[in-house]
Amino acid sequence: MSLTSSNMLPLGAKAPKFKLFDTLSKQTKSYEVLKGTKGMLIMFICNHCPYVLHMQDALVAVGNKYLELGIGVAAISSNDVVAYPDDDPVKMERFAMNLGFKFPYLYDETQEVAKSYDAACTPDFYLFDHHDDLVYRGRFDASRPGNDTKVTGTDLISSLEHLNSGQSQSLIQLPSMGCNIKWRS
């Protein structure tokens, strides 16, 4: 496991727009279509990363809950599927269906979307308000594989709750950590 931290895109940055293939609906989905009335949560994940697998159930529960509360949610996999076939779109669909995603699981085949977000690791989280301004980028919580800290999602949930209730976000935001995105050579 290679431990990589988020690049921490500057707060206030505008959400990079995209159109990506959704492995669940088999349709191309855009940022504009997926965005909720209150904002948008983008999660860069993949199928095989031990950091994602460590929190997968909580991650899906958080995504499903806030989707129902008016925050758009999308998971994106940008890994090189030639070098990492466990992350191919067919397996992405199975992964999402087995875990009960209610939100799309998008395939970033060209890796351009990950680059536009300056995504570095899986998982990597970005929360935008209804004006498409970045209000949170950082970790899910302090839990990591092997550190005996319970997975709670507390950091991301706090930010989602602030967005949901219209409160100001904390400026203390800690980077996510996980496997590096598997870039094509």
Image (cartoon, rainbow, N blue to C red):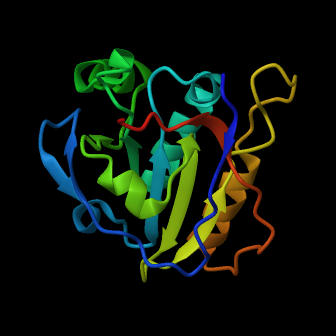
Residue 140 x, y percent position in the rendering = 68, 46
**For residue 179, what is the image quadrant?**
top right
Residue lying at 41% horizontally and 56% vertically, measured from the top left: 115
Q: Is residue 152 left or right of residue 108?
A: right
Can residue 91 be seen here? The reply is yes
Quadrant location, the N terminus:
top right
Considering depth in this image, is 50 or 24 the residue closer to the camera? 50
Q: In this view, does 154 lie above or below 41?
A: above
Q: Is residue 141 left or right of residue 16?
A: right
Residue lying at 38% horizontally and 20% vertically, measured from the top left: 84
Residue 2 x, y percent position in the rendering = 66, 28
Residue 20 x, y percent position in the rendering = 22, 50
Q: Is residue 99 left or right of residue 90?
A: right
Residue extending farthest front: 185
Residue lying at 61% horizontally and 21% vertically, measured from the top left: 50
Residue extending farthest left: 27
Can residue 73 be seen here? The reply is no
Residue lying at 53% horizontally and 64% vertically, measured from the top left: 127
Q: Is residue 68 left or right of residue 137?
A: left
Residue 161 x, y percent position in the rendering = 65, 63
**For residue 174, what is the image quadrant?**
bottom right
Residue extending farthest right: 148
**For residue 144, what is the image quadrant?**
top right
Q: Is residue 182 above or below residue 168?
A: above
Quadrant location, the C terminus:
top left
